[in-house]
Structure formats: structure tokens, C-alpha cells
Image (cartoon, rainbow, N blue to C red):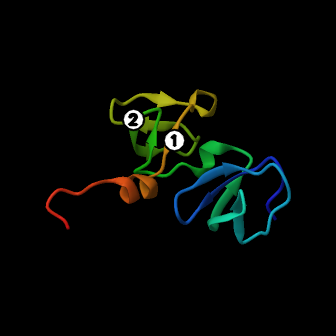
Amino acid sequence: MIEVGEYVRTDKGIISKINSGVDIDMVEFENAIIGDVVKHSKNIIDLIEVGDFVNEEFVLHISKDKIIFTELNNEISENEVHTILTHEMYEQNCYKVGEE
């Protein structure tokens, strides 16, 4: 059950914090459905996946203790996460040269 105060990640790569009751399968944002919930947690770091960008750095690995390793071999903890660009959002908004 998704609870108020938890973070969710949808199949479209949207990450959002739940501030009021929601349907367990769908998240609505300003009356627009933003996708099916694939993960939810009270800790935003649990929603980060390999291939995402955190604080403008590419996530290469996530360790068992929830430390994120980036391409610069930095380690960051949950309280150091300021921005997340999911790999789904990157793919959706990326212009690919040579494709029509």
C-alpha cells in the first residue's frame, strides 16, 4: 500500500512524492495520469536505478548499502541527492541524430 509521504516511480520514469491518498496502481498529478507505479518507498534513494542521472552524474552502480557510485567514482548517500533524471525521461527527451 502506498502511503502519504512516500516517493513513487512510474513506468514512464516520473518520480514524485505522494502528499495525499492515491490509487495503488496509478498516480495522478494535476488531474493527469503520469503512469503505473513500479516502485514506492519512503526513501527516494530506493527509486534510483542504474542508468539514471543523480546530481548530473550517471549512475553506474548501486551498492547493497544504498550508496550510489557515479562515473567519477564518487559515493553519495540519500541526503546528498538533489536532482534525479531518470533513464526513461532521458530517452523520451533525447534527440537522436539521424532518426526521423
Q: CA distance from mark 2 to mark 1?
A: 9 Å
Q: Quadrant of residue 79?
A: top right
- Disc 2 secondary structure class: strand
Work out which residue is located at the far left of the displayed protein and give it: 98
- In the visual, does 98 lie left or right of 31? left
Q: Which residue is mark 2?
A: 57
Q: Quadrant of residue 33?
A: bottom right
Foreground pick, 64 / 24: 24
Q: Which residue is mark 1?
A: 84
Q: Residue at x 45, y 54 (%)?
A: 89
Quarter of the figure that contains the N terminus: bottom right
- Residue 62 pos. (x, y %): 48, 45
Q: Residue at x 44, y 58 (%)?
A: 88
Q: Name the amino acid type tagged 2.
A: Glu
Foreground pick, 95 / 13: 95
- Residue 84 pos. (x, y %): 51, 41
- Residue 72 pos. (x, y %): 33, 29
Q: Quadrant of residue 87?
A: bottom left
Q: Residue at x 79, y 60 (%)?
A: 2
- Residue 45 pos. (x, y %): 60, 43
Q: Would you say the residues marked 2 and 1 are in contact, meaning their CB atoms lie under 8 Å apart?
A: no
Q: Earlier in the sequence, mark 2 or mark 1?
A: 2
Q: Name the amino acid type tagged 1.
A: Ile
Q: Residue at x 17, y 56 (%)?
A: 97
In this rendering, the answer to whether 16 lies above or below 21 is: above
- Disc 1 secondary structure class: strand
Dot 2: within a 10 Å radius of its alpha carbon, few (fewer than 14), some, or many (20 or more) residues? some
